[in-house]
Amino acid sequence: LQPSSAGSSWRRECSASSGCLAAGIKARSRKGAALWRLILVAVFSMAGRGTVLLLLLLAQGCTVEALFGLEGAGGTFRYGHIFWERVAGNEVQFTVQAAFSRNVDTSYFKGSALDGFARVGDKVTMTGRETPMFDFGDGFEQRMDMLELTVIAYSVRENWILGEKVLPGHVYPTPNDEGREGSPAKPWFAKFTGCCRLGQLVNNADSPWVLTAEVDLQKALASPRVGILPMISVPSTAFRDPFTPSTILNGPSFRVPATSAVPQEDRCDRRVKHWELEKPWAVGTAARFKSDSAVSVSLAGFSTTDAMSCCTTPATCLSPPDAAKPSVSAGCLFRLLRSDNQQRALTVEGWVRIDQPAGGVVMKTGRMPGSTCPESHKGICDVSLIQVHVNASHITVGHETHMPSTGSWALRTVSFEIASNMMLVNELNDPQYYSNAPQNSIHNKWVHVAVVRKTNSKFRPGSGENYFQHWFSTYKVYVNGHALETQRLTGCTRTSANPCQGEGRAGVNFYGFEDNNGLLSDQYDPGESNPVAGPRLTGPYADGDFIVRGRCKWNGEQVPACIDGFGNGTALVFGMFEGDLDEWRFWNGERSQTDIQSWFQKPLSPDQSVYYGDPTEGGPVTRLNYETVSLLVASYNFDWDRSQIGSCEGSQLAAGCPFDQLEPIFPENADDKYTAVRSGDVVFVDTGTSRLMFYESGEIFQLEEGGVIRFRQATPIPVGMYQVTVRVAIDMDMPRVPVDFIVEVLNQDGFSVDGDLGVLGDGLCKFPQYPCLYNTTLNAFAPTLNVTGNIAGVATGDENHCDVGSYITSTARFVRGDQREGLLNVNDFVYPNRLRAYAGFEMSLTFRGMDSQMRAGIRDAVDTQVGFSIGPAPAYGRFSTVKGTNPSEMTMEWTPCVADLTSVVCVEAVDYHVDRHENTVARSAASQSKCVALQVERDPAPMWLGERARTVNFIMGRPTSITLIAVEHNSLDEIEIDVVGGQLPPGATLSHGDLPCLHCLNKTVTMSWTPGQDMGGYTATLQFRVKDTGGACPGAEGQEDIVEVHLVVAKCRYMVQKDMQLQELASVFHMDWIRLWSLNSMEASLNHPDYLVLAEPAQVINVGHTYRVLAGTETLEQITRRFGMTMEQLKQLNYDLMDATEVMEGARLCVVPNPCTGLSQTIYSGLQYQDNKFLNNAAGVFEPPRAQ
């Protein structure tokens, strides 16, 4: 049996292939904390108004293991996250991460760990009371029940497993949802849904989850990613310095770490800068009204004869949907509103918040706003068939009926008092439910109001006098699921001994008619009002009565039904008061208090019907079963996406979104007659966030800059587990993705600040008014966590901080551990700061946990152990086994590669206390988590300091050295230096060395060379290369940097060696000492030929003249002949001529003229010099002489 009307009736579904028949009977408390299902066959026997339920156990081979395992433990969902990236074109790949309770007794969560449950690498299947679904937002859905999650993290002590599923690529038709014509484009909204959340939550326990991710490929090619743990711990109050208790060190807050999907380079402008608190599931919006504004639905289309007949005679239905579900057809809604002798019970429920204590009428029927209705036709177009009035202290309900004695219409009402139910009063005054004043009032508070109206009548048949002798209604009112009592019961003296409830009321005169036939002597339910005459008038029907009296015109059938025109020109009107409305529903049949309590906090939508049953399906609802069966006829949820506007979120929603029309959520795909029309100033606004309305979040948390979530209350927060939903984006106008997790609040006195300096107080359970999850004898303190590693500041000239929004993040990097000087504290560089890890090189972090309980002496150290819970870790990250018990240590090592994105690793220390004498284990407590953002960057290439090309000048005979310095900013790397271009000159040597460098590598290479006396004019280019290892990633190659060094040896210059005489040096260069001395006549140190031996320091002298070769006129032979030199002598002085056969124009040569053997005249001898040039003919042209 599947639910057919959201918790009230059930329809049978049986698979012929399985041969299995099961009945699911659900009983759910108001808190939603427990839910039981039995495998039963239900046999009902109707006996008057009593019902006998016989339960027979069904012995069939049905597989119900998952059902019992999951639901016996309550909800198991703890964490959810969606992120995505573009593949190509409009194809997007989504990744879903979800965490559930680990030790659930179901085969879906079994694994390979020693305890039989899942661990990292195992496969588990997502399941729950609702089949988890992934809706891509463009009409395509992916069932998650058949998809496995790969476990990527788990915690035995905290009882969770975290799994990940990468969905196949999905191709969207367009980069974003272009919307309806004339509407602005909006993102695609992809949703991950299911049920239920953890049953032990303080807020939103056992509720469904709906996580919504936005996709707009015109704004982003990938979404951010969040790396928070599924459960984190915070203290209940602010930390205080134990030495100066008045100084607050840190408040009860935490960060939501998020990173962008920019590979390798995590630029400042691409870091996550936008966080926002989100609703835990899609609760939509509400409508805000002014006293002169309304949203109205004309009932003209509901009141046709065919429509009304369809309600009870399916054969007359004009559309197949109405014929299939006649009890929820349009005609049924109209018959229920105006009251009907066959449609006997109407339930109206919805959420309301009134701005003023006086409140107003929040829902009624009457004249369509803006239209006119003559008084003579009031019964057609302006009669209030039902109305609900709400003020700060009462809910007043009723209807109008005609008064024969006066010939006018009178409003008959019953007022129900808020103060009549002390449970409701306590709830309204409880700051955990409502934080806003005033006390004992519903003023300015979101409350759920449910009104049940049951109509009764007495039909009197007879020749010529078929009419209804009596027509009256009773009302029940529930606020937040609590039954209210009437302020005054008509016809009854209310005393403590006679509360006028649950008793017979025969013989009482009600508004002018007597209970002559005992019709009114039924037993009425507690809280049900006395009968109220109307809305119809009793007595025989006459032509025209429907206009002024509303008497029922019998249709002539054996079972009479009213087919007259009473109220068929009215409208269903919401508003005309100052305040808000949300989720208003109309049911055919009476909703029980259990039904109301089970569903008033859950929005109803067609996409949930697959899980909870279709609330419109079942029945039919008749005059015999209306007290036990109820079907949803219509529902207006006041969500912006049910209107014609394109978007209403963020700042738009905060300002209020105006609209013109509103469609219902039920019936699904309703036709135009259901469309509500706005009149006056009505806008969509955000719905309530009190603990009672749909979900609780905004009253508990507040969002601060940089992803900081802080508890609002300054006083200690009640201990327990709280659900939080956050959406993150790179920037405010970019696509947002959700993360849903649990925050566990622990008593402040059980915490100590880092360094174990906390004040030891009363332990984890300080507030006796709240359920305590801890055994303070065994576990009085949460552990502390310290993170260490070898990190230092960023390299010189590198970016070391980012201005992200209004906060600054800093960056450090991993370095070698052999230099302790200048190392930084990792605890100072947790998220949002970054630790730079270079691709291909191993980084290491050490986590140290300690529990103060050992020091407190509550149990000895053997009984107290500290372990660790680890969130999603990077691929191929390695964690050591835990060393020690208390304190304990664990090491993480990871060698990232280029393809790895920035990863956030979150860790917390978790304690474990055992009483060996009593053989009991205390519930574990966790430290505040610490998250480290590991920013993966390419290994920086080594580089040469100085210019990329440089020239070094040498002199023959002078020793000269050149030192090149290479630097590697990644101190985890190694570098080598070699010569890859050119050859060292003869006699040159290389030597390698190291220079001190704090957290980097500096290596040197020195070339030393003394050019010989025949090296003048020598030139060469050497290429020095510095190369690193490239790291350990597959396919990685070392990076290199090249510097060019040009070697140039000067001509005609020589450094005199020690003890060398002028005569000796002259013979080396094939000349006499007189010529050598004359070449240096201008040198002050050689003004005497014998001074050379005694010169200190060694002198550089000229060993020849510099000569520039003329253009195209000289050969080497001519030059040697002219200066009286041998070819051997010329090439000794000019190394660049060693292998030359000719000389280029403009070349500069070193020559030593010999006056005895050289030419006696130059080529210019005998020429006339005129006008700054030489002439040798009459034409004034110089013609050089031919060589002799």
Image (cartoon, rainbow, N blue to C red):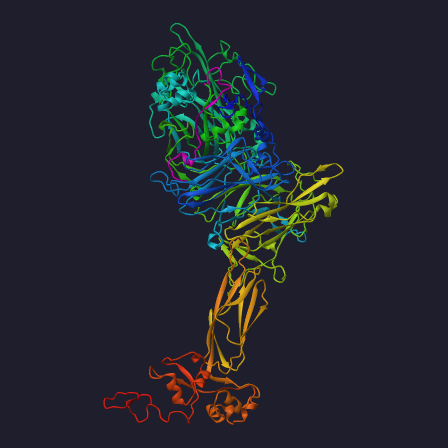
Residue 35 visible in the shown view? no
The reply to whether residue 14 is visible in this rendering is: yes
User: Horizontal placement of 1047 versus 178: left or right?
Assistant: right
Q: How many marks?
A: 0
- Relative placement, left or right, of 235 versus 412 is right
Which residue is the extreme one toward the top? Answer: 463
Could you say where residue 609 lies in the image, as x and y percent from the top left?
47, 28
Whether residue 525 is situated above or below residue 815 in the rendered picture:
above
* Residue in view at x 54 percent, y 92 percent: 1091
Q: Which residues are magenta?
A: 620-647
Q: Is residue 502 above or below residue 605?
A: above
x, y (%) of residue 54? Answer: 58, 16
Q: Nearer the viewer, residue 411 or 702?
A: 702
In the current view of this chain or complex, which residue is farthest to the right? 917
Residue lying furthest left in this view? 1179
Residue 1068 included in the magenta stretch of the image: no
Residue 710 picture quarter: top right
Q: As rendered, which of 639 and 607 lies closer to the eye? A: 607
Out of 193 and 393, give the one closest to the viewer: 193
Image quadrant occupied by the C terminus: bottom left
> Residue 221 in the image: x percent, y percent?
43, 47
Q: Is residue 96 left or right of residue 369?
A: right
Residue 207 position (above or below residue 842): above
- Asked if 484 appears above or below 537 in the picture, the reply is below
Classified by dominant secondary structure, the portion drawn in magenta counts as loop
Based on the picture, tell me whether residue 625 belongs to the magenta stretch: yes
Q: Position of residue 1135 (x, y in %)?
A: 45, 80
